[in-house]
Amino acid sequence: MSLFTLGSNARDRIDFLIWDEGATQEKAREAASGTDIDHDPTLTVYPADKPNGKAILMCPGGGYTHLALQHEGHDMAPWLNAQGITYAVLKYRMPHGDSSIPLKDAEQAMRIMRKHAAEWGVGPGKIGVMGASAGGHLASTLATHYSSKETRPDFQVLFYPVITMDPSYTHMGSHNYLLGENPGKEKEELFSNEKQVNAETPKAFIFLSADDGAVPPANGINYFNALNANKVPASLHVYPIGGHGWGFRDSFPYKRQWTGELEKWLREEI
């Protein structure tokens, strides 16, 4: 990995090019196969001035075609830092039908978080993943498809997440850009994360709007049910209005409620 921007003190924003030379090599391979890498994957870390031992890796949404890096990413840094939480935003690559690409980036970001945990005042067992919309799918994919103890998040926080790849109630844009338009039922089931939950899946905080017209609420609700069935601690919050994609925006009518509820959960459950 390459650290390419470092502020004047240890608590300034830090940017990592997560694959360093490997990114260039992978870019060349993907170009040869006709896949556009879009951008080099980066991790922007905001270490807390007064760390409480906890850290969150954020995966912004964007339907696996782009990234909502501000209101579902960087805008949350001051709020989380004020709680003592070290916060990181992942600028992951778009899959273009290769479902392995975003997950590779998320796993590598978790490796970086764990490698630097001690210097940022982050304790073992307290590094979680957060995601919004399609980023919620990536976060829940990391939580259910992690390849090692090192890349397993210790908890997950999901904003109005895409969870399933079942065509009957997925977000079809996310489905098509992640898997391709005709991936087959086996691949759809593999990335329907409600079907991949087991007793080792990390605890979860899920919140969404009942009137979400983009990602059916059944995505988050069925994921909660799967966690509950496997006796994984989970908290589900459904707000009556608000639609989709609110992130940290003040225009969401229940912002005070969700921020307060999440603060309490992070303080008492993590």
Image (cartoon, rainbow, N blue to C red):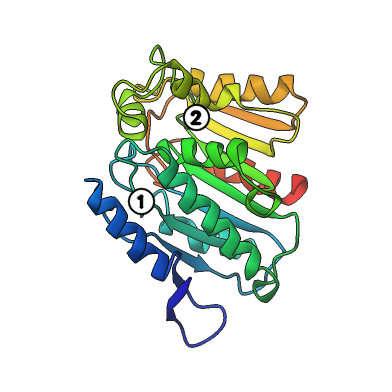
Residue 152 is marked as none
User: Which amino acid, by three-letter code, is at mark 2?
Assistant: Leu
Residue at x 64% of width, y 68% of height? 115
Assess disc 2: are there few (<14), some (14-19) or many (≥20) residues with their C-alpha within 10 Å of its C-alpha.
many
Residue 232 in percent (x, y) is at: 74, 30
Q: Are marks 1 and 2 in contact (CB under 8 Å)?
A: no
Q: Is residue 228 above or below residue 174?
A: above
Looking at the image, can residue 86 be seen?
no
Q: Is residue 120 above or below residue 234?
A: below
Which residue lies under the disc numbered 2? 208
Residue 93 is marked as 1
117 or 75: nearer the viewer: 117
Q: Answer with the quarter of the image where residue 83 lies.
A: bottom right
User: Disc 2 on helix, strand or loop?
Assistant: strand
Residue 5 in percent (x, y) is at: 41, 79
Residue 157 in percent (x, y) is at: 58, 41
Q: Earlier in the sequence, mark 1 or mark 2?
A: 1
The outermost residue toward the bottom is: 8
